C-alpha cells in the first residue's frame, strides 16, 4: 500500500481514498475476485470512512468499464432521478443571500429553507447503491455478501473519525443539529468529535447486514425502501416506494472521442464526461504543446471556455431536453471550434462573467486486473453529508440529488418528474495501443478542467498515472479569473498575464486524482494503479 505513487501487479490493483478502502478492494482481489468485485467492495467501504463525501445512500454512481472477456467498453449511469411528484415549481425561489451558499454559487438565486439542499425534499432516488450492485451483478463473480464483509469488519473494529470527517462535522454542525437522527449518528456524546475519537457508525451495521442478506435491491424494493419512503414523507419529502422500485441504472455503450492516438470513452449524459471529450476533441486540432509553455495553459483555458458555454447552454437529461450530442462530439464541430480559436487576437478579451461553484464531496475508485477488466467509478453524496437526512435506526445518510437540478423553472436542467440531474463527474477510460487506462477524481465543476489536463499530459507527454495526478492544475468555466494552483510556475503566470488573462492563485483545484491500467505486451500483461491517493494490490500490501 503506497500513497501518492504508482504500483504494478501481476494480479490486480485498486486506487482509492482513504487507505482502508483501497485495502478492502485489495482483499477482495486476494480472495479471488476480479476488478469489478474489487471496485464494488471499495465503493462500499469508502462511505463507511468518508460519509461526508459519499454514502451507500449517495445520490449517484457513474462508471466506465472495460470487460476483459470481450474488450468492450460500457457506461454505467446510476444517477439519481427526481421523484414522480417533482415539478419545476417545487421550490420557492428567492433573491441571493449576501452570505452565499450552494444555490447562490450554482444557480444565482436562493431557495427558501435551502429545501433542495438539506432535508427530506432534497432527496431523489439514491443511485449509488444501485450502481454498485449493477457493477457486481453484471460482471462480478464472488458472492455479494463477500463484497459487503470488508465494510462490516471496518464497523466492528471501529476507526478514528479522521481529521477530514471531524472537520466536516464541525463545519456543518448547524445543519446536522437540525436532524436528530443525523446528530445521533455523527456526533460523539452530542459534541463535535475529535479526529482520534473511535467511531463505529451507529446503526449502520444493521443496514449493511440487511443489504448483505437481502441483496442490494432491498434499498429499492424491500424493507429499507419501505422505511426510506415512510420517513421521508413524514418529514415532508416526496419520494415514494414506487419511485424506488422503478429505478434501474442504465448500462449502455459509452460516449467516445479521439485525442491523438488515443480513443476516449466517457459515461453518458447527464454525467460530465461529454464536456471532457469535447474539450479533448478540440485540442486534438490544435498544436501539441508542453505544459512548460504558457501557450499550453492559454490554449487549455480558451478551449474550456468554449466547452463550458456549450455545457451551460445545451446539456441536461437527454430524455427531457434536446441535447445535440452527436454535433458536440463530432470531429467537424471540434475542427470548427479550433479554427475559431486560431483566429483569436493575441490578447484575451474578457467578455464573459465567471460562473460560481458549490462545494462538492465526491470519491473516485479505479481498479484493474490481469484478465483485462478495468473500472473507473465515481460515487458521491453531493455536498458534505448530502441532504443531512439520516434514516432513524439505520444510520443511512441520504444524498441530495435534487440540488443538482436547477431550482429555477424553464431551463434545460430544471426540476422535472423522473429527471436525472446534470453533474460534473468525469469518469473516463482511455484506450491506447496495448493499454487501457481508467481515470477519475472528485472536485465538482473543476473535474472537467483537471480531467482534460490529465489526459493531455498522459498522451502528449507520456507521463505516468502518478505524475499526471499530481501535476500543477488550472480551472476556468465560461470566463475569468483563471484559477492557477500555487504550484504552477511563476513564469507560466507571467506569460498568461502578458496574454491578458486575469489570474487567481488558489491552494486547491479538485481532489485526489488516480487511475488504473491494463497493459499488454509480448511478455504478457501488467496491471497498474496509482495517483495522488492510495494504491493497493494483493501482492503489494504493506
Image: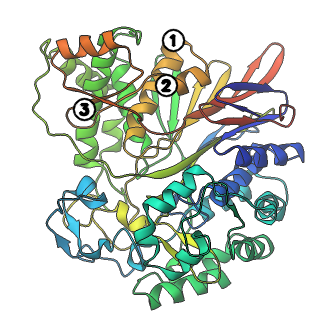
Of 176 and 530, nearer the camera is 176
Tell me if 204 is positioned left or right of 231 in this view. right
Q: Position of residue 507 (x, y in %)?
A: 39, 33
Q: Are marks 2 and 1 in contact (CB under 8 Å)?
A: no
Q: Position of residue 204 (x, y in %)?
A: 69, 72
- In the figure, 223 relative to 388: above or below? below
Query: Where on the picture, by quarter, is residue 296?
Result: top left
Using the numbered discs, state the Cα–Cα distance from disc 3 to disc 1 in whole angstroms.
Answer: 23 Å
Q: Position of residue 492 (x, y in %)?
A: 32, 13
- In the figure, 201 relative to 252: above or below? below
Residue at 42% x, 21% y is 487
If you read the primary sequence from the N terminus, does the residue marked by circle 2 or circle 1 appear first?
A: 2
Q: How many marks?
A: 3
Residue at 47% x, 64% y is 386
Q: Which mark is residue 461?
A: 1
- In the figure, 396 relative to 23: above or below? below
Q: Which mark is residue 455?
A: 2
Q: Secondary structure at mark 3?
A: helix
If you read the primary sequence from the N terminus, does the residue marked by circle 3 or circle 1 appear first?
A: 3
Q: Secondary structure at mark 2?
A: helix
Q: Position of residue 368 (x, y in %)?
A: 72, 36
Residue at 35% x, 40% y is 326
Q: Secondary structure at mark 1?
A: helix
If you read the primary sequence from the N terminus, does the residue marked by circle 3 or circle 2 appear first?
A: 3
Quarter of the image with the N terminus in it? top right
Instruction: Report whether residue 53 is seen.
Output: no
Q: Badge 3 is on which residue? A: 305
Q: Are marks 3 and 2 in contact (CB under 8 Å)?
A: no
Using the numbered discs, state the Cα–Cα distance from disc 3 to disc 2 in whole angstroms.
Answer: 18 Å
Q: Are marks 3 and 1 in contact (CB under 8 Å)?
A: no
Q: Residues within 10 Å of mark 2 (few under 14, many from 20)?
A: many
Using the numbered discs, state the Cα–Cα distance from disc 2 to disc 1 in whole angstroms.
Answer: 10 Å
Amino acid at each position: 500500500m503506497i500513497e501518492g505513487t504508482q504500483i504494478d501487479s501481476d494480479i490486480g490493483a485498486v486506487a482509492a481514498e482513504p487507505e482502508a478502502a483501497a485495502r478492502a478492494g485489495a482483499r477482495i482481489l486476494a480472495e479471488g475476485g476480479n476488478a469489478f468485485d474489487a471496485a464494488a467492495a471499495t465503493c462500499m467501504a469508502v462511505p463507511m470512512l468518508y460519509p461526508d463525501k459519499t454514502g451507500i445512500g449517495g445520490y449517484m454512481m457513474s462508471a466506465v468499464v472495460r470487460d476483459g472477456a470481450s474488450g468492450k467498453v460500457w457506461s454505467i449511469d446510476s444517477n439519481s432521478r427526481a421523484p414522480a411528484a417533482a415539478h419545476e415549481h417545487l421550490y420557492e425561489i428567492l433573491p441571493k443571500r449576501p452570505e452565499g451558499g450552494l444555490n447562490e454559487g450554482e444557480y444565482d438565486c436562493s431557495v427558501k429553507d435551502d429545501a433542495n439542499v438539506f432535508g427530506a425534499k432534497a432527496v431523489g432516488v439514491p443511485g449509488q447503491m444501485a450502481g454498485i450492485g449493477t457493477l457486481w451483478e453484471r460482471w462480478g463473480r464472488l458472492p455479494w455478501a463477500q463484497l459487503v464483509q470488508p465494510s462490516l469488519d471496518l464497523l466492528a473494529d471501529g476507526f478514528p473519525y479522521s481529521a477530514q470527517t471531524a472537520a466536516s462535522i464541525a463545519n456543518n454542525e448547524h445543519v446536522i443539529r437540525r436532524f436528530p437522527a443525523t446528530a445521533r449518528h455523527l456526533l460523539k456524546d452530542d459534541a463535535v468529535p475529535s479526529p482520534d475519537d473511535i467511531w463505529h457508525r451507529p446503526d449502520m451495521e444493521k443496514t449493511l447486514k440487511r443489504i448483505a442478506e437481502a441483496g442490494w435491491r432491498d434499498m429499492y424494493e424491500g424493507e429499507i425502501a419501505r422505511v426510506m419512503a415512510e420517513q421521508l414523507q413524514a418529514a415532508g419529502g416526496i419520494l415514494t416506494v414506487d419511485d424506488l422500485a422503478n429505478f434501474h441504472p442504465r448500462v449502455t455503450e459509452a460516449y467516445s472521442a479521439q485525442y491523438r492516438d488515443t480513443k476516449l470513452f466517457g459515461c453518458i449524459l447527464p454525467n460530465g464526461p461529454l464536456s471532457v471529450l469535447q474539450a479533448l476533441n478540440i485540442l486534438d486540432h490544435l498544436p501539441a504543446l508542453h505544459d512548460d509553455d504558457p501557450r499550453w495553459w492559454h490554449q487549455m483555458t480558451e478551449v474550456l471556455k468554449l466547452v463550458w458555454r456549450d455545457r451551460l447552454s445545451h446539456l441536461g437529461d437527454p430524455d427531457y431536453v434536446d441535447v445535440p450530442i452527436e454535433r458536440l462530439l463530432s470531429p467537424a464541430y471540434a475542427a470548427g471550434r479550433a479554427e475559431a480559436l486560431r483566429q483569436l487576437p493575441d490578447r484575451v478579451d474578457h467578455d464573459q462573467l465567471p460562473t460560481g461553484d458549490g462545494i462538492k464531496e465526491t470519491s473516485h475508485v479505479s481498479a484493474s486486473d490481469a484478465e483485462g477488466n478495468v473500472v473507473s467509478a465515481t460515487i458521491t453524496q453531493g455536498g458534505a453529508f448530502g441532504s443531512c437526512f439520516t434514516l432513524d435506526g439505520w444510520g443511512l445518510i441520504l444524498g441530495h440529488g435534487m440540488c443538482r437540478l436547477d431550482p429555477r423553472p424553464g431551463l434545460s436542467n430544471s426540476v422535472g418528474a423522473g429527471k436525472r440531474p446534470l453533474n460534473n463527474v468525469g469518469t473516463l477510460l482511455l484506450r491506447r495501443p496495448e493499454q487501457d487506462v481508467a481515470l477519475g477524481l472528485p472536485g465538482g465543476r473543476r473535474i472537467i478542467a483537471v480531467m482534460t489536463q490529465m489526459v493531455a499530459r498522459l498522451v502528449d507527454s507520456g507521463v505516468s498515472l502518478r505524475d499526471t495526478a499530481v501535476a500543477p492544475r488550472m480551472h476556468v468555466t465560461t470566463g475569468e479569473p483563471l484559477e492557477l494552483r500555487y504550484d504552477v510556475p511563476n513564469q507560466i503566470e507571467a506569460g498568461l498575464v502578458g496574454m491578458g488573462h486575469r489570474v487567481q492563485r488558489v491552494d486547491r483545484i479538485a481532489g485526489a486524482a488516480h487511475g488504473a491500467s491494463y497493459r499488454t505486451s509480448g511478455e504478457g500483461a501488467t496491471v497498474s494503479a496509482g495517483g495522488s491517493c492510495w494504491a493497493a494490490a494483493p501482492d503489494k500490501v504493506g
